Amino acid sequence: MAKKNVTVVGSGNWGMAIATIIAGNTARHPEFEDNLTVWMFDEEVQHKGVKRKLSELFNETKENVKYLPGITLPPHVIAEPDIKKAIKDADILIWVLPHQFVARTVQNMGPVKPGAVSVSLIKGGLELEGGKLGLCSDLLRKLLGHEVAVLMGANVANEVAAGEFCEATLGCMSKEHQPLLIKLFDCQTFRVTAVDDIPGVELCGALKNVVALGAGFCDGLDYGGNTKAALIRIGLQEMKMFIRYFYPEAKDATFLESCGVADLITTCFGGRNRKCAEAFVRSKGVKGWDAIEKELLGGQKLQGTLTAQEIWPVMQKHNLTEKLPLFTTIYRIAFEDKAPWTIVKLPQGMHFSGLHADDGFFEQK
């Protein structure tokens, strides 16, 4: 069998971190070509007082000084600023870029190799089409015309790049591609479990960023761990209710995988969405989201606010605002000047127990 070429489409913080994992596995497993290509958007950076192209600097030093400083990647990771060249020979495409850039990137890259497959690590990009909630993986499948799996989990990029132990969940419907894709990601420090539930895995990855905004509001108000834990539990409950409304086939077990409760916990205690939401509250209305993103994220994009804006009209159209009071309150604090302290004033009558008979968290036998 011919060895598989792999390309990572995206070179931000998470893109470079996952490239460290993939590069270790392409070198270790005979199924893959050693060299790993990373499509790196050609931007200029200041390095030692000189303006340099980021891709050229990376290929010299194997360090992405802007998005993953201090981490040296293996020598067989090669940055390619031309998207057409980067994907030309790829058998497996790994998508790690903000969802708002997906359509434009696909338009610019030309035809993909016949028989190629993709894995999306993109969190967000939800659209309502004909009453059905469309996922970013659906968009990729439609644009590329090939199989698309998803990978989500409790993965803070800098910790992954540093080799700290963590887990992730691969959502893949193809039994043919599943073993190969697990080999591409799984290693001693990055353990991967596969499930055949793409909507559950992907929507957990997107919706947890909205809950993390609520956790950040709590931190900005100096509330304690009890309050944050309560919001995490309610957030998981509302994630489940939202996902099950549009995808009733989503599996209970998915919420207990790394992509579910574990990712929710780590995002609510660390990560950019919590951090920016705390800053939003502490600024007392002086700074908007764009200013906070620019100040704190160093060129990275804030996903929780975008996802909140995407799901809000969906919730309104399907009369879900009262059924999902935490999501509703988070949106109104973020975009309608609702007081941040209302995060702990959720309406009476909501289901406070995750085991409530009507909650639907566990399937009825």
Image: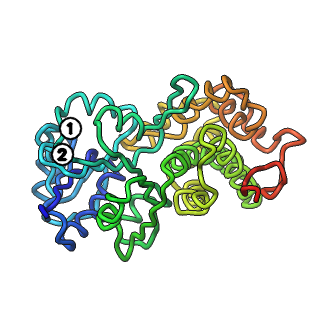
The vertical placement of 205 against 72, above or below, is: above
The answer to whether residue 24 is left or right of residue 231 is left
Query: Residue 136: x percent and y percent?
Result: 43, 38
Query: Residue 302: x percent and y percent?
Result: 47, 40
Between 342 and 319, the one lying in front of the other is: 319
Mark 2–mark 1 CB contact (< 8 Å): yes
The vertical placement of 209 against 233, above or below, is: above
Measure how far apart labels 2 and 1 are at the Cα level. Answer: 6 Å
The colour scheme is: rainbow
- Residue at 19%, 34% in the rendered image: 109
- Name the kind of residue labelled 2 in the image: Leu
10 Å crowding of disc 1: few (<14), some (14-19), many (20+): few
Badge 2 marks a residue whose secondary structure is helix
- Residue at 54%, 22% in the rendered image: 130
Badge 1 marks a residue whose secondary structure is loop
The answer to whether residue 52 is visible is: no
Task: Please name the residue that numbered disc 2 is placed on.
Answer: 54
The answer to whether residue 75 is visible is: yes
- Residue at 55%, 63% in the rendered image: 257
Task: Please name the residue that numbered disc 1 is placed on.
Answer: 43
Query: Residue 272: x percent and y percent?
Result: 49, 48
The vertical placement of 296 against 177, above or below, is: above
Query: Residue 184: x percent and y percent?
Result: 29, 64
- Name the kind of residue labelled 1 in the image: Glu
Could you tell me which quadrant the N terminus lies in? Answer: bottom left
Could you tell me which quadrant the C terminus lies in? Answer: bottom right
